[in-house]
Image (spheres, rainbow, N blue to C red):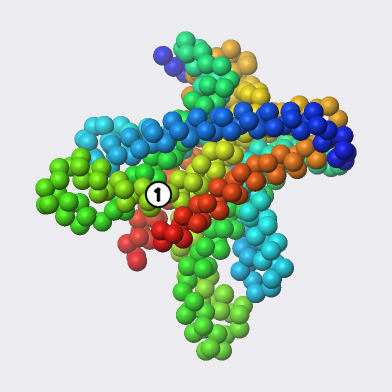
Amino acid sequence: MIDFSILIDHWDMYLEGFGNTLKASLLALIGSFVLGTIFAIFRISPIRPLNWIGAAFVEFIRNIPLILVVFLFFVGLPAIGIVLNPFLAGTMGLTVYTAAFIAETIRAGIQAVPKGQTEAARSSGLTYLQTMRYVILPQAIKVVIPPMGNQFINLVKNSSVLGVIAGLDLMYFGDLIAADTFVTFDVYIFVGLFYLILTLPLSSFVSYLERRLAKGR
Amino acid sequence: MDFIGAYTPSHLTFLLEGFWITLQVAFLSIVFSFAIAIVVGVLRYARIPVVSRILATVVELVRNLPLLLIIFFTYFALPEVGIKLDKFYAAVLALVIFEAAMLSEIVRSGLNSVEKGQIEAARSSGLNYVQTLWHVVLPQALRRMVPPIVSQFISLLKDTSLAVIIALPELMNHAQIINGRNVNYVIPTFLLVAVMYFVVNYALSIVSKRLENKHA
């Protein structure tokens, strides 16, 4: 039977890990949204070299493992003299990795708006930026929100790689508690429950949004 | 940065050996998780009263957990209840559990995307439920599932790198060993490793895009 005394005795450690997991996920979400938007704009911009930069970033990052990106920040940067603490290195790795996926999501959302919309807006005298701001983006955002939610769920789960580099997250504290108690089974069950506290509500919210969006069409 | 020191023939073969393990883990996991996903997806689609409910719950739980935790679980926690697996099979088992849950969702939504009229037509022309599923629904659904399934395979190949935490001697693990020898090898080694993953995954993604265009 599962031993609840582990949870009670190590409550503060679980909570600290949970807090850091949440913090890393939120920071990476904000960072990757900004970075992802920039790269999405690169990819759809009329300037050719920017397209290439955007495409190169997205394709390269999407096709390599997250842990490699995190290691580049955690082990690679110190090799050229830049030392970051594990939490920061992990969060930056997560940010860059997630940004590639978010850039794709946003690009797909923008391109889902029919071309006629742009043409109509441009011919009624709006500039390119105005067309984006008032016509394209408001429509794209509706399409983009559910997949963005999925990205956030992935982000919370992916933040567990911080545990590999001692990034003070839930996984890391789980390891500490397991080493402390010589129990692994129960310790990881509780770690899993803490992740589910974050991811389950998020995923039912996302499927609610998806259903609503499907109805609106 | 020492590219020449990092790219010696012995280091390159060492990395390729690691990549071979990575590919083996990925291949076994793909085969088993896909087989399980088809069964789970079909059972959920068929809405068998209790079974579908239980499967839905299990899939939902697994999908919402970090894969890293599942790997820890199969390698460190299962021995506590008497199931002892070596690193290779612990990694494969974890990947199969996780990816089967992910893939089964793809299978289920693929099946759901087949129009109801198709089923009604098949049933009224005398096919029974299993025949309808096998000859009418599955072939159409599978075709639509190909692109998302290929992207899930790409994720799977990338995810094998998480087995580095249980020191499975795959590509990331071998890269870390080389990095441990000299700090100047770190960036050249990681770059090469990134290229190795990239080449295989990018090839897969091109295949997926081709298929997508073909069936669109």
The three-letter amino acid code for the residue at tag 1 is Met
Residue nearest the viewer, comparing A66 with A177:
A66
**Which residue corresponds to the image point at 11% horizontal and 48% vertical from the top-left?**
B126
Q: Can residue A115 be seen in this view?
A: yes
Locate residue A180: give its quadrant. Answer: top right
Q: Can residue B98 be seen in this view?
A: no
**Which residue corresponds to the image point at 61% horizontal and 69% vertical from the top-left?**
A44
In the visual, does A49 lie left or right of B137?
Answer: right
The spot of residue B191 in percent (x, y) is 75, 43
How crowded is the residue under tag 1: few (<14 C-alpha within 10 Å), some, or many (20+)? some
Is B164 rendered above or below residue A34?
above
The spot of residue A5 in percent (x, y) is 50, 16
Which residue position is annotated with label 1? B145
Is A192 rendered above or below residue A126?
above
Q: Which chain letter goes with mark 1?
A: B
Residue nearest the viewer, comparing B23 with A41:
B23
Q: In which quarter of the image is the C terminus of chain B?
A: bottom left
